Amino acid sequence: MAILAALPIKLALATGTDLSPDEAYYLGAARLDGVRPRLVDHPPMVVWLSGLGDRLPALPLELRVRLPFVALSVALTLACVAVADRRGAGPRGRSLVALATSFGLLPMVGGFLATPDVPALLAVVAALGWAVPQAGPSRPRHAVATIAAGIAIALGALSKVVVLPLAVAIAVAARSRSTAARIALLVPMVLAYALLAPSLTFQLRHAFGAGAVDPAGAFAALAAAASAQVLLWSPWLLARGVVALRRAPTSPESLVVAALTVLVAISAVVRATPPEPNWWAPAALALVIAAGARTDEATKQAANRAAELADRARPAIVAWLAAPTLLAAAHALHPFLPLPTRADPTARLHGWRSARPPLDAPGVGPYASAAERCANASDCADLRLYFDRLNRNQ
């Protein structure tokens, strides 16, 4: 029900807002460079998907570019529910996972925008599903599952390079799989490395490049990063996930949370800047899946009190997630909140065909005007110059 309820909202947002500068940037790369994009700041998958959507006939520009990502967001929720189910979730647990991954603010935003996050998250969740112990299937079926998961990981890494360390962490933690299977899981990703290398170098500099460490700034950045995740996912949901993973400290979900938390914390410390909230999203999904899954009999009693508290807090969790999401969606479609453009994160979704585009909106980069002209008027000369400068500076 949560998936069906969220889908019309995503489609309305996909149709009723302009392409953001980032989306126009990916689309411009697809139009300029085709299947061999020259971008160094992102792997090519988001460009390929944007170009694929751009070829869909008889649809408005915004909807056709975003439609592949809307479909992938539905697949992501279904995959999260399926992994929670394999982990032992009952109906209430599956419902909680579906609600969190459909009506959370980040899932809703990623559910209609053309962004590399959703393909990458889908790959991580597919790998988590592969790592769940499963009785019964024959060896050929195990091999097929490993090949499918490996391909999914490679495609996810071609969306965001953070999939690389997370895939290694999952392979290490997947003790129910043979050593050969864990190695085979990573082979497609290794084969795709040539397409990832430029973006990996760029993203390492972006996430960890800094000058002298500022202790006060580092502490503030860490506090802001942690607070943002609590606000986005609710303290009750995160607490239940943490309790579940504490009982399985070497599980793939635990290693994903630990690895990504360390990477995000290091970035916050060395840059003295809060990382973007979506950087921690794979860890958040691992916690959501753990929160929905039922603890096994050996740990059920120890975790019982926290689980009961989470069940009693279920209405609060749903309200915490859904209320700001629905408010933000309504404002994105028809702005009504008294926010100045420079403080309104939805401002970059409107006005790019007007005489006064929202150049001072949050998250608008120096490429915005060039990218929007390329997307909306097929005038890509300035964007080509921007790509040329970006590549020369590497």
Image (tube, rainbow, N blue to C red):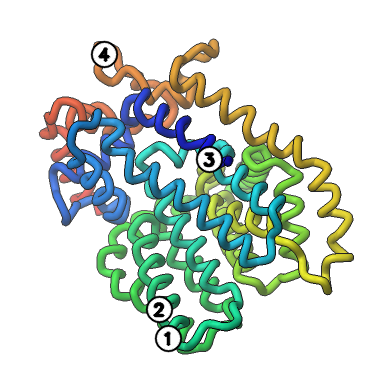
CA–CA distance between discs 3 and 1? Answer: 38 Å
- Is disc 4 surrounded by few (<14), some (14 to 19) or many (20+) residues within 10 Å? few
| Residue at the spot of label 2 | 144
The reply, left or right, for residue 256 in relation to residue 340 is: right
- Amino acid found under the numbered disc labelled 4: Ser
The answer to whether the residues at label 4 and label 1 have Cβ atoms under 8 Å apart is no
Residue in view at x 33 percent, y 45 percent:
68
| Residue at the spot of label 3 | 106
CA–CA distance between discs 3 and 2? Answer: 32 Å
The answer to whether the residues at label 2 and label 4 have Cβ atoms under 8 Å apart is no
Q: Earlier in the sequence, mark 4 or mark 1?
A: 1
| Residue at the spot of label 1 | 140
Query: Residue 324, how many percent across, how many down?
Result: 61, 28
Q: Secondary structure at mark 4?
A: loop
Q: Nearer the viewer, mark 4 or mark 1?
A: 1
Closer to us: 355 or 203: 355
Q: Earlier in the sequence, mark 3 or mark 4?
A: 3
User: Against 173, is 379 above or below?
Assistant: above
Query: Residue 357, how many percent across, how many down?
Result: 30, 17
| Residue at the spot of label 4 | 354
Q: Nearer the viewer, mark 3 or mark 1?
A: 1
Task: Locate the C terminus by quadrant.
Answer: bottom left
The reply, left or right, for residue 97 in relation to residue 42 is: right
Q: Earlier in the sequence, mark 3 or mark 1?
A: 3
CA–CA distance between discs 3 and 4? Answer: 28 Å
Q: Secondary structure at mark 2?
A: helix
Query: Residue 139, how many percent across, how many down?
Result: 47, 88
Q: Quadrant of residue 227?
A: top right
CA–CA distance between discs 2 and 1? Answer: 6 Å
The answer to whether the residues at label 3 and label 2 have Cβ atoms under 8 Å apart is no
Q: Secondary structure at mark 1?
A: helix
